Image: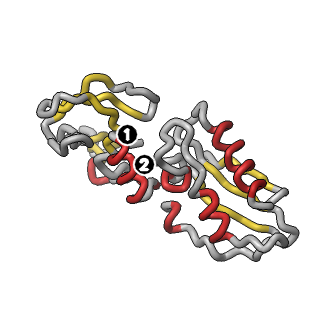
Amino acid sequence: MTAAAIDRTAVAPAKAGAHAEQIWAWLAEVSDPEIPVISIVDLGIVRDVQLAADGACTVTITPTYSGCPAMQVIADAITDALHAHGLQDVRLQNQLSPAWTTDWMSEAGKAKLQGYGIAPPAQQVIDISGLRAGVGADGALAAISRRAQPRLTVACPNCGSRHTEITSQFGSTPCKALYKCLDCREPFDYFKCH
């Protein structure tokens, strides 16, 4: 489920007059600390917002990967942003399952990455078409294996060329890889599919 698909209006208004849609808008102003051009909502980290009748606000977040060092900074930024808008009782809930995926990124967020010089994820992650169950010699199903996938083509965010190559599986952060455009010769980060 993407952040855009979550029902953001199904909660009762808080005592301070805030409502879920307004809180989502406030959270959309909180930037990711590692990639400040994209918000935590566009990134898909914010999973849910719940308001209790007593005004308590619970925000459910999912880290982009287990052990992400930015999660404490994100948690503090969420709390600070909501306190600044008058919500005093802010509770954060970490949800690890299902694990975060780049499929949860908004299209607007992907466009912001592109404009910032980071190639957005080039494929959908949740795609079981590349998986098949093998059949053993005894006719029993063997372990599921992955079919060979075609080489990933990543478009250069600077010139748009698809004539690019990977130079390192690891970029400036663990969620990115380093690519080089063979046409404009510029290096660039690629936000890896997770």
Labels 1 & 2 near each other (Cβ < 8 A) = yes
Q: Secondary structure at mark 2?
A: helix
Q: Position of residue 183 (x, y in %)?
A: 12, 33
> Which residue position holds label 2?
102
Q: Position of residue 44 (x, y in %)?
A: 51, 53
Quadrant of the snapshot with the C terminus: top left
In the image, residue 112 sits, relative to residue 20, either above or below, namely: above
> Which residue position holds label 1?
191
Residue at the image position 30 percent from the left and 49 percent from the top: 123
Q: Position of residue 41 (x, y in %)?
A: 54, 55
Q: In the orientation shown, which residue stands out farthest toward the right?
A: 54
Q: Is residue 151 left or right of residue 168?
A: left
Of badges 1 and 2, the one in the foreground is 1
Instruction: Identify the disc placed on residue 165.
Output: none
Q: Is residue 72 left or right of residue 104?
A: right
Q: Amino acid at mark 2?
A: Thr
Comparing 18 with 75, the one in front is 18
Q: Amino acid at mark 1?
A: Phe
Residue at the image position 64 percent from the left and 75 percent from the top: 9
Q: In the orientation shown, which residue stands out farthest toward the top?
A: 168
